[in-house]
Amino acid sequence: MAHLSKPQIAVLALWSFDVVIARSCGLTTVTCLLAQLVGAKEAAMRERLRDLYREAAAKKGQKRAEWYVESCFGPLLGWILSWWRGESHRLALVLDATTLSDRLVVLAISVVYRGCAIPVAWEVVEGQRRGSWRPFWEQLLDRVAAAIPPDWFVLVLADRGLYAPWLFQRLQRRGWHPFRRINAQGLFRPQGEAYRPLGSLGSQPGTAWAGVGICFKGQPLACTLLAVCGEASQQPWFIVTDLPVAQADAAWYGLRPWIESGFKDLKRGGWQWHQTRITNPRRTERFWLVLAVATLWVVSVGGEADATQPVHDLDALPEPPSAHRRATHRSRPRLLGCFRQGLLIILVTLLRGRPCPWAISAPILGPLLPNLKNLHF
């Protein structure tokens, strides 16, 4: 992030480092730890940290500078992609939102990796704000797209609440591949047939259906539909994508819940962001950069330790189990997540007086999409 000033980079590095060590992003906790670590006064350190997220008018001194966190989204994602090893240029992105009580809503795009999620772009809005989120998602996608080479295979997943025809089509125009779950209500017209209720396709336990056609009668969408219901499932999955039937597997939707694990890591499972007292959306956006860098470090270290195992762990996800086995060839679920592994490895390394580890390995979609290497999109 060379566009940031040296003081900004220093504070970002110090704060993200201490978030990992303290397992808390709280200003008071981090200030106390840092002050003792570098031999500074707590009051001075507190003001130095707060300047990272405060607007220029709220800062002291003659060299007050405004900065915008969206300028970091491209470099942050480029940072991750620069570590991809091998010739596999495949990426899975997930779109979702998380809330802070009823005060704030964070719209986030994350890279999913070995059961974890690394936020790479986000927008924070007031919890009671009314209106469409479409402009925010469009801006976030534009920021992320600037960092992804055009020849990469990009799979974009989202849950039913974020389905919209405009988003599906916008991803297609970028050359990316939407993989979106939809509600069971509606109609689908298989190629060469009449419209049929979605619920009549692959809705029985242990059944699956896939075909090309037109989804929705009111707002027609040309797509591939995947309908699958596992042996023990109570609700089937209905997924729309633009991938050919022969190349798409409904089990890939199991990647989407990983962003929920990522939100948990940001909150009670990791950085304790849910206890923050920051209520200003713009300040929160800047503060999230600290959390993103801390998460990137921990997940990268945990991922390196997990590199001897398959990248994707779909065995422990919901049905259908047969598809999970085909996608991963994994014999048993991961016993310790990458996030937790990373935390432990960093702690042990520091206790032994060794240099801090920092690495990320293995392409995200390598073993998951082995049959795509000969296709041209």
Image (cartoon, rainbow, N blue to C red):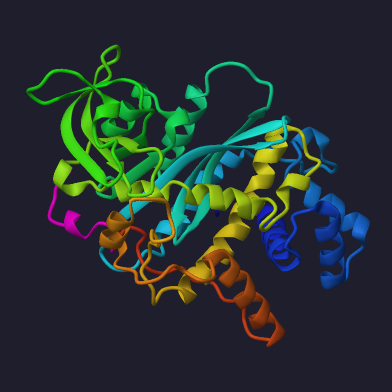
Q: Is residue 229 magenta?
A: no
Q: Position of residue 108 (x, y in %)?
A: 53, 40
* Residue depicted at 55% across the width and 46% down the height: 72
Quarter residue 11 falls in: bottom right
Q: Is residue 289 visible?
A: yes
* Residue depicted at 60% across the width and 77% down the height: 345
Q: Is residue 374 magenta?
A: yes
Q: Position of residue 281 (x, y in %)?
A: 69, 32
Query: The N terminus appears in which quarter of the rendering?
Result: bottom right
Q: Is residue 75 visible?
A: no
Q: Which residue occupies the foreground of this view, 321 or 275?
A: 321
Q: Majority secondary structure of the magenta segment?
A: loop
Quarter residue 202 falls in: top left
Compared with 78, 179 (above or below) is above
What residue occupies the far bottom of the structure in this picture? 352
Q: Which residue occupies the foreground of this view, 154 or 272?
A: 272
Task: Give the mark count.
Answer: 0
What residue occupies the far top of the structure in this picture? 218
Compared with 189, 112 (above or below) is below
Q: Position of residue 57 (x, y in %)?
A: 79, 33
Compared with 242, 250 (above or below) is below
Query: The C terminus appears in which quarter of the rendering?
Result: top left
* Residue depicted at 74% across the width and 36% down the height: 55
What residue occupies the far left of the structure in this picture? 192
In the visual, does 64 lie left or right of 369? right
In the visual, does 246 lie left or right of 255? left
Q: Which residues are magenta?
A: 367-377
Compared with 187, 90 (above or below) is below
Q: Position of residue 168 (x, y in %)?
A: 33, 29
Quarter residue 368 falls in: bottom left
